[in-house]
Image (cartoon, rainbow, N blue to C red):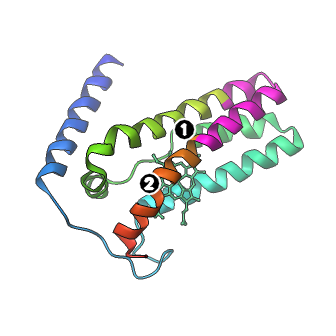
Amino acid sequence: MQHRLMLKNVFVNAILCLSMASTGFQARAEDSSGANSMELRRIMQDLGENMQTVTDGIARENWALIKETAPLIADHPQAPFSEKIKILSFIGSNVGKFRGYDKQTHQAARDLELAAMKRDGEMVIAAFARLQNSCLACHQSFRKPFVEHFYGQH
Ligand code: HEC
């Protein structure tokens, strides 16, 4: 665990150095859902689908479904290295904020999993609301500038 954490820190530092060295390049996509869109968008679309699965699980009181879906949200894949560099280069000094929102999403999804294991419907809904708030908070801060920058939509 300690070892993994250390490796992670080394990795993050390496990315930060690289992102500082590489300024101002951007990926352009011809259409928003096509082959040229960024991996981050695909990751987000999967998150959206998994959230819908959870909503359905709540309606059906299918706690097992929620229990198996929540970790897919908590441990969603990360963008590939080269894309991460572009993203970090773009968000620059807001990196702490960006990672903070991602952490909140992770934590709320973990709480959701625990609540589902307890088969506690109200706790599930409370954790789900917190989860949705974490998505929204990041989107309110980052979505518009992100889409403008990487997809050139104004
Ligand atoms: C750390 C920041 C961050 C968090 C947390 C986050 N998102 Fe996003 N999300 C983004 C950004 C940036 C975009 C814009 C990316 C784009 O349009 O390519 C986005 C876009 C999306 C989209 C639109 C994709 C499309 O096809 O246009 C969906 C759906 C989405 N997010 C779902 C979620 C869900 C569900 C959660 C929470 C479980 C979540 N996101 C949490 C940053 C975040």
Q: Which mark is residue 71?
A: none
| Front in this rendered view, residue 123 or 94 | 94
* Quarter of the figure with the N terminus: top left
Residue 148's x, y, as percent?
39, 69
Which residue appears farthest toward the bottom when viewing the image?
30
Q: Is label 2's Cβ within 8 Å of ligand 1? A: yes
Q: Which residue is mark 2?
A: 142
* Residue 70 relative to residue 55: left or right: left
Dot 2 amino acid type: Phe
Residue 113 painted magenta? yes
* Quarter of the figure with the C terminus: bottom left
| Front in this rendered view, residue 113 or 105 | 105
Q: Which residue is mark 1?
A: 105
Residue 131 painted magenta? yes
Which residue appears farthest toward the left when viewing the image?
21
Element type where label 2 sits in the image = helix
Of circles 1 and 2, the one toward us is 2
Which residue appears farthest toward the right when viewing the image?
60
Which residue appears farthest toward the top when viewing the image?
2
Q: Which residue occupies 38% across, 77% down?
A: 29
Residue 135's x, y, as percent?
57, 46
Q: Is label 1's Cβ within 8 Å of ligand 1? A: yes
Residue 96's x, y, as percent?
34, 37
* Residue 38 relative to residue 9: left or right: right
Element type where label 1 sits in the image = helix
Sequence-first disc among 1 and 2: 1
Picture quadrant where residue 80 is located: bottom left
Give the dominant element type of the magenta stretch: helix, strand or loop: helix
Dot 1 amino acid type: Thr
Q: Which residue occupies 57% across, 60% down?
A: 45
The region drawn magenta spans: 112-133
